């Protein structure tokens, strides 16, 4: 008897493409939130596959904090052109200039919280009713119960008690005017799956994922790249370190890891033997034990 | 690529569900599977150790790992379905972890809906209890192909073979009343690790496999339906570009059977027939790559040789193997809303990629899920109740019985006022 088997990456890919197509079919104005990180790169690739040979039938939205790694922006512009996609940029700097938000002060100031306002303003301005994102359930405790179709009220808030059960592959995207959904096609992927898929599909990723020399300081156990956005304490002495990044966020809160991994294969074996989650390198999650849950309730990614 | 990397590329995937109450050792078992497969990271473990210490516990409470939201931590209960992931070189595992109390039936049903396997825990000291009946009934109703019954806390009954065999015997009697095919039994101690990953030295009389070995090797490739061809059309791809001016592709995820180029397919509901021209499995971003056969659960794009009208919600099938087509159907429903189901009630209904409306014509009976007794006189179906109802839809559905195909046999009911998913239905 012939056996019909798919390996786990093909099953995860099929599931994600199914969710992306459901989003395009059930909503009027979807968008794909693009951070420049590996998960959103995988998302763009899956969206291209889902509709090929047509172009992705919705825009990519980048919420630009102004504190990005320069490598991320260069990569973003290359990918948008390669995919023939439409790009919309929501600027946190403009939100600050317009007085919509007030910048955090002090040594650990981050624009991470401010992004939420810019994101919700952008959603409102373009009337997006579904925002696709690359978040995964394995990333953080508050995400372990996240749905594929995550309902947000008309303030953009996530109510963990008011989420719809998801059975089989039936996704309920019905909503009232003003409400919208966040959609997470990579829900069932792990960090390892993402890397394996990037290797399998031979995807290009920003250079900061690979080991390189960079001037850093170590603050509260997190290795931060020095930049104009990070004022140094008098006691802090920057030094050159051999590092790479496991996630890509703002320069102010994304920590590097000491690494010699120069190729995808080396990254994969590093992830396989790693003893710390990738969000363990993010200082924004360390503010309190429920930091992620609090930000999600307010409408964070 | 390293050897380890290669093995990850060829992993299978198994989804399983666990249900249990606070003290039957479920969290300890999950914690042990995650820990022994090195899926718990140092920072996660440190956070749990810190919290356990602050709460004054003597031991590290592994339940904190599977216990996500603040509201739940405050109440000390899990109120939803939490998904956990671990992998061995052979398989990637997705655990749908649900609470086992009767008031969380809807969560158990949700977790069970996508599972290949149910892990049922029995406390060796207590034997089969109401909760065992309930979990087994849900596994049977949701047609989970495999069941592993873990008889836990064997250390507390002196690793007695007799205790184990009595429980196995008792469970076999229970399973006669159910529709379950593949049931296996393992005596374990989740706390001490006996027969979880390593074979126990305390139970030499047990000749079977460890839990991890079974999870890694249980035969799952025939869990999908590869007989009855069903392709619900999800999206029509029309590039509107110079290069692909005439391209018209039907995108979707195969729900059953095996499709091949050259096959004659019938489009439902129109009844037109055409031949499949090409099937693109989208292995890369080009149209050069086509596959000789496509099967569930692949997402593909098909082209047809004739210009027939096909849109979202239609289904491609083989002429000699048609699904049923009805407007009047009986379904087993699990109710998920505080507002009870009512005869005459109208709901939106989702089935594959099709949206219709329905009206509840009759409530046939309600099931007591602890005793499996059918109550034909009690017809109130409220939150967490399961019963058989008769509905009429505004347009015909193209379906198979849930026993035959879990995708084309399932529906959800949606409250048209709140848009909430209020019912999960399995077509009888």
Image (cartoon, coloured by chain):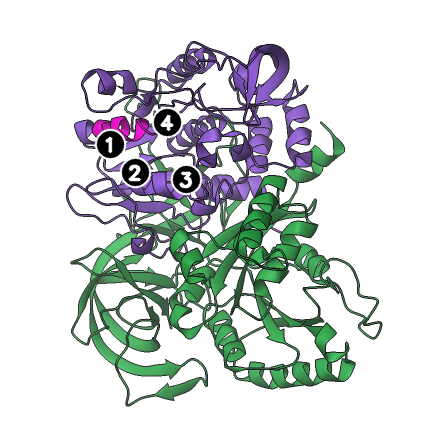
**Which of these two is toward me, B395 or A85?**
A85
- Answer with the quarter of the image where residue A64 lies: top left
The mark nearer the N terminus, 3 or 1, is: 1
The mark nearer the N terminus, 1 or 2, is: 1
Colour in which chain A is shown?
Answer: purple
Q: Disc 2, disc 3: CB below 8 Å?
A: no
Residue at the image position 41 percent from the left and 62 percent from the top: B75
For the stretch drawn in magenta, what is the main secondary structure?
A: helix
What distance separates the C-alpha of mark 1 from that of mark 4?
14 Å
The mark nearer the N terminus, 2 or 3, is: 3
**Which of these two is toward me, B322 or B103?**
B103
Residue A292 location (% of width, % of height):
41, 40
Magenta part of the protein: which range? A113-123
The mark nearer the N terminus, 3 or 4, is: 4
Discs 3 and 4 lie in a common subunit: yes
Q: Which residue is under mark 3?
A: A291
Characterize the local packing of mark 3: few (<14), some (14-19) or many (20 or more) Cα atoms within 10 angstroms: few
Residue B278 location (% of width, % of height):
45, 36
Residue at the image position 42 percent from the left and 39 percent from the top: A17
At mark 3, the secondary structure is helix
What distance separates the C-alpha of mark 3 from that of mark 4?
12 Å
As drawn, A221 above or below A225 = below
What distance separates the C-alpha of mark 1 from that of mark 2?
7 Å
Q: Which residue is under mark 4?
A: A112
Q: Disc 1, disc 2: CB below 8 Å?
A: yes
Colour in which chain B is shown?
Answer: green
Residue at the image position 68 percent from the left and 64 percent from the top: B191
Q: Which residue is under mark 2?
A: A299
The mark nearer the N terminus, 1 or 4, is: 4
Discs 2 and 3 lie in a common subunit: yes
Q: Residue A120 carries which label?
A: 1
- Answer with the quarter of the image where residue A155 lies: top left
């Amino acid at each position: 008897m012939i056996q019909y088997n798919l390996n786990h990456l093909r099953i995860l890919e099929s599931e994600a493409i199914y969710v992306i197509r459901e989003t395009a079919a059930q909503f009027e104005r979807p968008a794909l939130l693009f951070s420049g990180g590996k998960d959103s790169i995988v998302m763009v690739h899956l969206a291209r596959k889902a509709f090929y040979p047509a172009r992705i039938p919705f825009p990519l939205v980048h919420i630009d904090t102004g504190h990005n790694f320069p490598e991320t922006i260069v990569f973003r512009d290359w990918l948008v052109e390669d995919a023939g996609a439409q790009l919309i940029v929501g600027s946190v700097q403009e939100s600050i200039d317009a007085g919509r938000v007030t910048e955090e002060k002090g040594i650990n100031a981050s624009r991470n919280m401010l992004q939420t306002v810019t994101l919700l303003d952008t959603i409102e301005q373009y009337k997006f009713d579904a925002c696709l994102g690359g978040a995964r359930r394995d990333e953080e405790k508050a995400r372990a119960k996240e749905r594929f179709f995550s309902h947000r009220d008309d303030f953009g808030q996530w109510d963990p008690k008011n989420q719809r059960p998801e059975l089989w592959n039936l996704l309920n995207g019905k909503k009232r005017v003003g409400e919208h959904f966040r959609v997470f096609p990579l829900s069932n992927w792990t960090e390892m799956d993402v890397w394996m898929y990037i290797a399998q599909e031979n995807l290009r990723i920003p250079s900061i994922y690979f080991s390189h020399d960079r001037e850093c300081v170590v603050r509260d156990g997190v290795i931060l790249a020095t930049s104009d956005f990070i004022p140094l304490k008098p006691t802090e002495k920057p030094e050159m370190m051999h590092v790479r990044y496991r996630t890509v966020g703002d320069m102010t809160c994304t920590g590097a890891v000491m690494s010699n991994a120069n190729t995808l294969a080396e990254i994969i074996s590093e992830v396989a033997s790693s003893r710390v989650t990738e969000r363990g390198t993010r200082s924004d999650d360390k503010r309190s034990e429920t930091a992620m849950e609090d930000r999600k309730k307010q409408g964070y990614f | 690529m390293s050897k380890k990397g290669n093995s990850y590329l060829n992993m299978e995937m198994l989804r399983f569900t666990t249900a249990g109450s606070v003290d039957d050792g479920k969290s300890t078992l999950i914690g042990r599977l995650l820990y022994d497969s090195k899926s718990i990271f140092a920072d996660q473990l440190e956070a749990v150790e810190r919290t356990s210490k602050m709460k004054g516990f003597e031991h590290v409470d592994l339940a904190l790992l599977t216990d996500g939201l603040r509201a739940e931590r405050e109440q000390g209960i899990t109120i939803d379905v939490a998904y956990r992931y671990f992998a061995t070189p052979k398989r990637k595992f997705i655990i749908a972890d649900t609470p086992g109390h009767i008031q969380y039936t809807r969560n158990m049903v949700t977790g069970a809906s996508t599972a290949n396997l149910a892990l049922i825990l029995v406390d060796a000291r207590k034997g089969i209890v109401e909760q065992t009946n309930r979990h087994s009934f849900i596994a049977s109703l949701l047609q989970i192909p495999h069941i592993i019954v873990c008889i836990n806390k064997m250390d507390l009954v002196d690793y007695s073979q007799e205790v184990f065999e009595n429980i196995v015997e008792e469970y076999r009697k229970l399973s006669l009343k159910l529709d379950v095919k593949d049931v296996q039994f393992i005596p374990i101690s989740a706390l001490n690790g006996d027969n979880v990953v390593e074979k126990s030295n305390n139970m030499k009389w047990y000749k079977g496999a460890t839990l991890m070995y079974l999870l890694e090797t249980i035969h799952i490739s025939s869990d999908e339906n590869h007989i009855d061809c069903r392709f619900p059309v999800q999206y029509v791809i029309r590039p509107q570009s110079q290069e692909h001016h005439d391209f018209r592709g039907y995108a979707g995820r195969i729900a059953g059977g095996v499709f091949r180029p050259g096959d004659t397919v019938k489009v439902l509901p129109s009844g037109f027939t055409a031949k499949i021209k090409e099937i693109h499995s989208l292995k890369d971003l080009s149209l050069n790559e086509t596959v000789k056969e496509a099967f569930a659960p692949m997402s593909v794009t098909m082209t047809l040789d004739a210009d027939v009208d096909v849109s979202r919600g239609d289904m491609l099938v083989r002429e000699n193997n048609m699904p049923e087509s009805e407007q009047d159907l009986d379904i087993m429903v699990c109710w998920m809303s505080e507002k009870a189901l009512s005869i005459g009630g109208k709901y939106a209904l989702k089935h594959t990629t099709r949206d219709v409306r329905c009206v509840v014509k009759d409530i046939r009976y309600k099931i007591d899920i602890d005793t499996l007794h059918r109550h034909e006189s009690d017809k109130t179906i409220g939150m967490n109740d399961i019963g058989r109802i008769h509905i009429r839809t505004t347009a015909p559905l193209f379906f198979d019985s849930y026993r035959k195909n879990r995708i084309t046999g399932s529906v959800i009911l949606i409250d048209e006022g709140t848009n909430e998913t209020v019912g999960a239905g399995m077509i009888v």
